[in-house]
Amino acid sequence: METCGKCRHFCRAKENVKDLCGAWEQPTFAKRAACGFYMPKARSHTQTHALADNKKA
């Protein structure tokens, strides 16, 4: 099951009491079921390989 905490739009904010969803600008929490705007977070090793490929071009 996809959850807000695994989404790219999920923002954990220290100054706010609740976390925020960047897609719809509303308070949320990490374990909430994901909405229609769900986009999985990119894995860090995937980003590293993508950067290396761009430098070769």
Image (cartoon, helix red, strand yellow):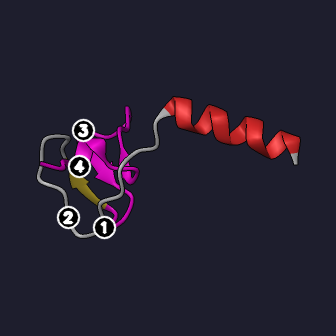
N-terminal of the pair, mark 4 or mark 2, is 4
N-terminal of the pair, mark 1 or mark 3, is 3
Q: How many marks?
A: 4
Q: Residue at x 23, y 70 (%)?
A: 36
Residue bearing the label numbered 4:
4
Q: CA distance from mark 1 to mark 3?
A: 23 Å
The residue carrying pointer 4 sits among few (fewer than 14), some (14 to 19) or many (20 or more) residues within 10 Å by Cα, namely many
Task: Name the spot of residue 6 as percent of width and height, x first.
Answer: 29, 43
Tag 1 and tag 2, C-beta contact below 8 Å: yes
Q: CA distance from mark 4 to mark 2?
A: 8 Å
33 sits left or right of 35 in the view: left
Residue bearing the label numbered 2:
35
User: Which mark identifies residue 37?
Assistant: 1
Which is in the foreground here, disc 3 or disc 2? 2
Which residues are the magenta region? 1-25
Residue bearing the label numbered 3:
17
Q: CA distance from mark 3 to mark 2?
A: 21 Å
Q: Amino acid at mark 1?
A: Phe
